[in-house]
């Protein structure tokens, strides 16, 4: 513990800021369009519920971190709670979720770029962004950290900019709008179907994806016991900002105008006579989306290296040079990127919905692991147990919501496919481990 404290460089508020930068991405800027499309104005409730559920998950992870900081964070806690099989499967569930998230973000970036280049196919734009992202990863860890710090500021600035422009547009200061040009979301709150709210909950959770990174980085805190404080502030701010932003989106434009072919923020802004604003905002969206895509590429590559170092993946993928990604791990990441681009060619119309649904589900499966590990390792009273099961219940509601819609059901089947493959791999490893130890 003392060694961890000496190495830690971050204060709790710095980790809060990093968390906001890691979490705000294409799940917020574009994935929210699916949530709005499904739930209508009731999407505000979906994001409030997701904020509560995310807080319970982070609170659990932060409590374990404060009690016993570990380099492997949630993977290590799963292993301590349930044995080696849990650490193995948890690591691969997380790797799969980040792989799908990366594909979702790559597709979102191409959709953002089509705002300017309508005639260029989605897959060609995805190729451009993937090459740039892979180049950043190859340059090393330090380049990723520097870029994320700058882009974190840009992402926060984008949301603040949208809220300020929305207020000015609603009051008629710019764009020729005014109170008569806007709608009141409260009056139309129940316009969407309640089943849509059920479906939307998954995408609301997806917009909070990234809290696991805060768990991994909590090891860098000056005092790991500050982890709960940093997450509490971050999630209160983030939930408030999300709800405020979507309130303005469905106030500036009818929720029925929102589609996954464009960011809901751009849809809201383009209805006003502000010719320069959508272009500036789209530039910011691309920068923000690129940063989260690079973060996912980095997570996919480094998690594979970590799994390799701990014997949960072939040894060839282990880190060979400090601060640099291993070539085999990097090559596998390139293969994953190529697969994402092939999917963009084969499924150009609905690929974002399919991949985002599967990515969100894999993320939630990982969160269930965190909650169960926390219950096994730390929870003693009925209050803590009730809170854990309330968090799991919200996640179960989000997962089952995908069953009732034909589009989201495909994403669920994709996530189920990954779970089956990981379960088989876990069983094979368990069978081999006693033999190797004999």
Image (cartoon, helix red, strand yellow):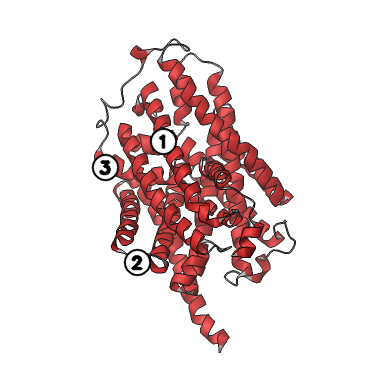
Q: Is residue 117 visible?
A: no
Instruction: Calculate the distance from the C-alpha at mark 1 to the C-alpha at mark 2.
Output: 32 Å
Alpha-carbon neighbours of circle 1 within 10 Å: few (<14), some, or many (≥20)?
A: few
Towards the viewer: 296 or 51: 51
- State the residue at coordinates (35%, 18%): 182
Alpha-carbon neighbours of circle 2 within 10 Å: few (<14), some, or many (≥20)?
A: few
Q: Position of residue 333 (x, y in %)?
A: 62, 55
Q: Earlier in the sequence, mark 1 or mark 3?
A: 3
Residue occupied by mark 2: 380
| Residue 240, disc | 1
Please tell me in which quadrant of the rendered image residue 216 appears: bottom right
Q: In the drawing, does residue 121 fall left or right of residue 347?
A: right
Q: Earlier in the sequence, mark 3 or mark 2?
A: 3
Q: In which quadrant will I find the C terminus?
A: bottom right
Residue occupied by mark 3: 195
Count of marks placed on residues: 3
Which SS class for mark 3? helix
- State the residue at coordinates (53%, 51%): 214
Q: Residue pushed farthest bottom?
A: 438
| Rendered position, 261 above or below 365 | above
Which SS class for mark 1? helix
| Rendered position, 55 above or below 69 | above
Which mark's residue is nearer the viewer, 3 or 2?
2
Q: Are marks 1 and 2 in contact (CB under 8 Å)?
A: no
Q: Position of residue 145 (x, y in %)?
A: 66, 46
Q: Are marks 3 and 2 in contact (CB under 8 Å)?
A: no
Q: Earlier in the sequence, mark 1 or mark 2?
A: 1
Q: Are marks 1 and 3 in contact (CB under 8 Å)?
A: no
| Rendered position, 380 above or below 31 | below
Please tell me in which quadrant of the rendered image residue 315 appears: bottom right
Q: Position of residue 41 (x, y in %)?
A: 32, 31
């Amino acid at each position: 513990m003392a060694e961890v404290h000496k190495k830690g460089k971050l204060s709790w508020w710095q980790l809060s800021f990093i968390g906001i930068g890691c979490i705000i991405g294409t799940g917020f800027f574009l994935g929210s369009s699916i949530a709005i499309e499904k739930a209508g104005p009731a999407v505000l409730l979906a994001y409030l519920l997701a904020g509560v559920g995310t807080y319970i998950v982070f609170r659990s992870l932060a409590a374990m971190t404060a009690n016993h900081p570990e380099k492997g964070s949630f993977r290590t806690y799963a292993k301590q709670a349930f044995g080696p099989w849990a650490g193995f499967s948890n690591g691969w569930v997380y790797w799969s979720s980040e792989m799908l998230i990366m594909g979702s973000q790559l597709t979102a970036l191409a959709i953002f770029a089509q705002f300017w280049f309508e005639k260029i196919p989605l897959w060609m734009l995805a190729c451009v962004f993937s090459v740039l992202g892979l180049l950043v990863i190859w340059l090393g860890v330090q380049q990723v950290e520097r870029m994320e710090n700058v882009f974190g500021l840009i992402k926060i600035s984008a949301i603040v900019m949208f809220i300020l422009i929305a207020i000015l547009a609603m009051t008629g200061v710019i764009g020729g709008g005014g109170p008569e040009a806007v709608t009141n979301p409260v009056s139309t709150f129940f316009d969407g179907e309640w089943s849509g709210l059920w479906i939307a909950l998954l995408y609301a959770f997806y917009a909070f994806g990234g809290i696991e990174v805060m768990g991994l980085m909590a090891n860098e805190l000056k005092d790991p016991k500050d982890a709960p404080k940093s997450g509490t502030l971050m999630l209160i701010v983030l939930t408030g900002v999300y709800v405020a932003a979507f309130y303005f989106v469905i106030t500036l434009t009818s929720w029925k105008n929102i589609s996954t072919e464009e960011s809901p923020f751009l849809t809201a802004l383009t209805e006003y006579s502000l010719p320069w604003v959508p272009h500036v905002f789209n530039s910011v969206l691309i920068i923000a989306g690129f940063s989260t895509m690079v973060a996912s590429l980095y997570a996919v590559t480094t998690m594979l290296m970590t799994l390799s170092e701990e014997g949960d993946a072939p040894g060839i993928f282990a880190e060979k040079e400090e601060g640099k990604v291993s070539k085999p791990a990097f090559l596998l990441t390139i293969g994953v990127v190529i697969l994402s681009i092939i999917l963009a060619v084969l499924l150009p119309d609905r690929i974002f919905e399919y991949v985002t649904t599967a990515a969100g589900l894999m993320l939630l499966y990982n969160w269930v692991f965190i909650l169960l590990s926390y219950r096994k390792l730390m929870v003693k009273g009925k209050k803590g147990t009730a809170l854990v099961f309330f968090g799991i219940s919200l996640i179960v509601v989000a997962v089952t919501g995908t069953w009732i819609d034909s589009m989201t059901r495909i994403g669920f089947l994709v996530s189920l496919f990954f779970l089956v493959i990981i379960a088989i791999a876990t069983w094979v490893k368990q069978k081999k481990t006693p033999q190797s130890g004999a």
